[in-house]
Image: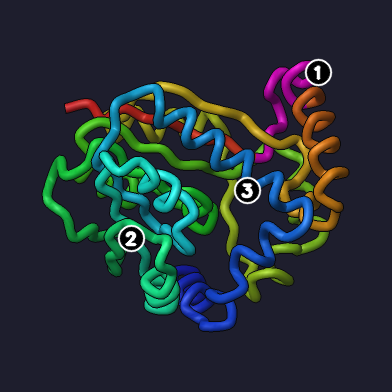
Amino acid sequence: MKEDKEIREFYSRQDESNKYDSVRFRNGGLVVDESEKKLVMNLAKTEKMQNILDVATGTGRFARLFSKDKKNKVFGFDYSKKMIKILKENKENYFEKVRGDAKMLPFKNNSFDCVTSMRFMIHYDDLSVFLKEMSRVSKKHIIFDTPNKYSLKTIVSFATNVTKKIFGFSYMSWFSEKDMRKTFDSLNLKVIGVRKTFFLPQGIYRFLPYPLARAAKRIDDFILHEILKGRMACAHTWMLAVKR
């Protein structure tokens, strides 16, 4: 797959690995980071999860959160050698680091209570191969996010070709809630919950000062949830149950 090769090359470059979070979450982008972390942790807290795999862990921002609870056994999994190297150099990363291909996870069936994967599925049209592997190694749950096809972010991305400018390639996928639910049904996965976030494209926040971004997020939440009732959210974060 051409797009697979481009994605792997991008995330394997040393300069991209080093500046990855500092670019995405600079200035008001921290509001996006905080929001995503709070969302994932709140979903995870609804069930007892102590054995966790974070797929496409990147800089380990979610694996690091889970590993703060010393009772948890956490694995950060990524394809990029550079990302894994950076993870190992950070002494605050108290979790296992494993390199490999998300299409062929090197773990036995039912190895984890939960598999998480954030900001990974955005690059692929067919998510089935990844979800099959995640459901194979998970005993209970999967938490991940997808970009919503019907959102302001979709319009902005197509109009400005922003993904091409940021990543060097234009491959980005969009999914409707209806299509995702069909995929889950075909894979015998049950939706426990879906959280809809951000009316404004998340990338806008990094250009705002942090205090202004916090105020913008409150307005964003009001528009999305009170006026639009969740429609036109930029992202859907899913919590799935693995049915045996």
Say whether residue 231 is magenta. Answer: yes
Q: Calculate the distance from the C-alpha at mark 1 to the C-alpha at mark 3.
A: 24 Å
Q: Hey, which residue is sitting farthest left in the picture? A: 108
Residue, disc 2: 77
Can residue 223 be seen at all in this image of the molecule? yes
Q: Give coordinates of residue 221: x percent, y percent.
A: 75, 27
Residue under numbered circle 3: 33
Callout 3 amino acid: Asp
Q: Would you say residue 92 sits in the magenta stretch?
A: no
Instruction: Establish if 50 lies above or below 79.
Output: above
Q: Are marks 1 and 3 in contact (CB under 8 Å)?
A: no
Task: Tell me which segment is drawn in magenta.
Answer: 224-234
Amino acid carrying label 2: it is Phe
Say what secondary structure mark 2 lies in.
Answer: strand
Task: Look at discs 1 and 2 and give the one toward the viewer.
Answer: 2
Quadrant of the drawing holding the C terminus: top left
Which residue shows up at 41% across the image and 75% down it?
89
Split into 4 quadrants, where in the image is the N terminus? bottom left
